[in-house]
Image (tube, rainbow, N blue to C red):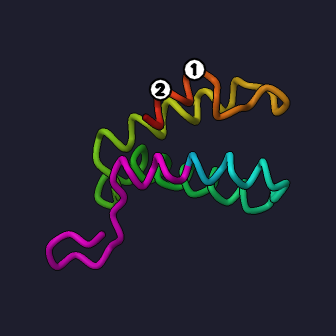
Amino acid sequence: MYEDEDSRIRWDATDIKMAIKRYFHKLDRSDFADADLEIEFMRSIHREWSYNPLMRRTDPEGMAIIDDFLKWFDATPFEDRSINDFTVRRLVR
């Protein structure tokens, strides 16, 4: 989505939730390279939020979803990652 005359792409909470769902869909299809791109997408937004406030591409609600998901992602072993996990279900609802 575009905001005013600013041509930077901005992502809202719905876009972030869809990225999480796409990540799990790609895992189910064994498309690990594309699944990693979804994680990198979220990490790039997280880095910009943390280190370059002028380049923020999401709102606080979207950033909270990304932050919680990345914490879960980093703490959960690969074999235990599932869209049915309580934390993930809470984030994408």
Q: Do the residues labelled 2 and 1 touch (CB within 8 Å)?
A: yes
Which residue is located at x 28 percent, y 48 percent?
59
Q: What SS does tag 1 mark?
A: helix
In the picture as drawn, the residue positioned furthest to the top comes out as 86
Q: Residue 36 carries which label?
A: none
Which SS type dominates the magenta stretch? loop
As measured in the structure, the alpha-carbon distance from the residue carrying label 2 to the one carrying label 1 is 6 Å
Q: Looking at the picture, which amino acid does disc 1 mark?
A: Phe
Q: Where is residue 67 in the image (x, y as percent from the top left)?
A: 48, 34
Q: What SS does tag 2 mark?
A: helix
Q: Looking at the picture, which amino acid does disc 2 mark?
A: Arg
Residue 40 vertical placement versus 71 (above, below): below
Query: How many marks are shown on the rendered structure?
Result: 2
Front one among 32 and 74: 32
Q: Which mark is residue 86?
A: 1
Give the magenta part as a residue range.
1-19
Q: Position of residue 48 (x, y in %)?
A: 44, 53
Residue 80 vertical placement versus 51 (above, below): above
Q: Position of residue 5 (x, y in %)?
A: 16, 79
13 part of magenta stretch: yes
Residue wearing tag 2: 90
Which residue is located at x 54 percent, y 50 percent?
42
Quadrant placement of the C terminus = top left
Q: Where is residue 87 in the image (x, y as percent from the top left)?
A: 55, 23
Which residue is located at x 47 percent, y 37 percent?
92
Quadrant placement of the N terminus = bottom left
Residue 64 vertical placement versus 23 (above, below): above
Which residue is located at x 45 percent, y 50 percent?
16
Number of other residues with Cα within 10 Å of mark 2, as a class: few under 14, some 14 to 19, many 20 or more: few
